[in-house]
Image (cartoon, rainbow, N blue to C red):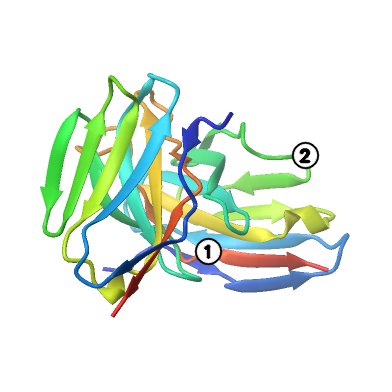
Amino acid sequence: QKEVEQDPGPLSVPEGAIVSLNCTYSNSAFQYFMWYRQYSRKGPELLMYTYSSGNKEDGRFTAQVDKSSKYISLFIRDSQPSDSATYLCALCMNTGFQKLVFGTGTRLLVSP
Amino acid sequence: GAGVSQSPRYKVAKRGQDVALRCDPISGHVSLFWYQQALGQGPEFLTYFQNEAQLDKSGLPSDRFFAERPEGSVSTLKIQRTQQEDSAVYLCASSLGWTSEHPYEQYFGPGTRLTVT
């Protein structure tokens, strides 16, 4: 079993839809949670960063963390075709070594 | 400002050849990471530097993989005697490091796509 599980998709939605992307993890030592967006043939781009349970909002994006359930989510409101990309969750333990453990990534397709 | 840059962007190597992949981190970033991303997968950690010190190399898949960062800035990932299973995108990331307000924010380069034939 992988440390971080993420549905690879693809997830297809119409423009304007609310998108929900999720990851589950098994190790409670993970304390820092990030979402990256990766366009085809590009490097991952940091979208959201959080370290506590609850919600964090940034524009059309909301990151949600439930440490008790070991479940994290990214919501995208009013989705746009330009949001079509692969979304990767990345987790980090609270240690001096900062390596990220990534999910597989979910491919999102937003159609006009 | 300039982001993380990597070169070459694409590399084709014949099986058995040695390759060297370069990473230029964001200026002032103390921490540098290498990740390997196979097709359809998320990046997987290879190794981590804090300044010039390699503090974690637990993700390097074999002793054919070697990384260095001699002056605490530019880093090189070297793969000796390449094999077909080494074909992947190699990503470099940098961060401000442990003493910063957001030590876990890593910024990625575009990657080097390595194809071993």
Q: Amino acid at mark 2?
A: Asp
Q: Secondary structure at mark 1?
A: loop
Residue ranking furthest to the bottom? A112
Can you see residue B104?
A: no
Can you see residue B95?
A: yes
Q: CA distance from mark 2 to mark 1?
A: 22 Å
The image position of residue B66, as x and y in percent, is 69, 45
Any mark on residue A87, and which?
Answer: none
Residue under numbered circle 1: B111
Left/right of residue A45 with respect to residue A27 in the rendered view: left
Q: Is B85 or B106 nearer to us in this picture? A: B85
Q: Is residue A90 above or below residue A12?
A: above
User: Is label 2 on the same chain as label 1?
Assistant: yes
Q: Is A98 or B73 nearer to us in this picture? A: A98
Tell me the quadrant of the picture where the C terminus of chain A can be found. bottom left
User: Residue B109 lies in what quarter of the image?
Assistant: bottom left
User: What chain does mark 1 sit on?
Assistant: B
Q: Amino acid at mark 1?
A: Gly
User: What chain does mark 2 sit on?
Assistant: B
At horizontal 37% and vertical 44% (from top left) the residue drawn is B30
Residue under numbered circle 2: B63
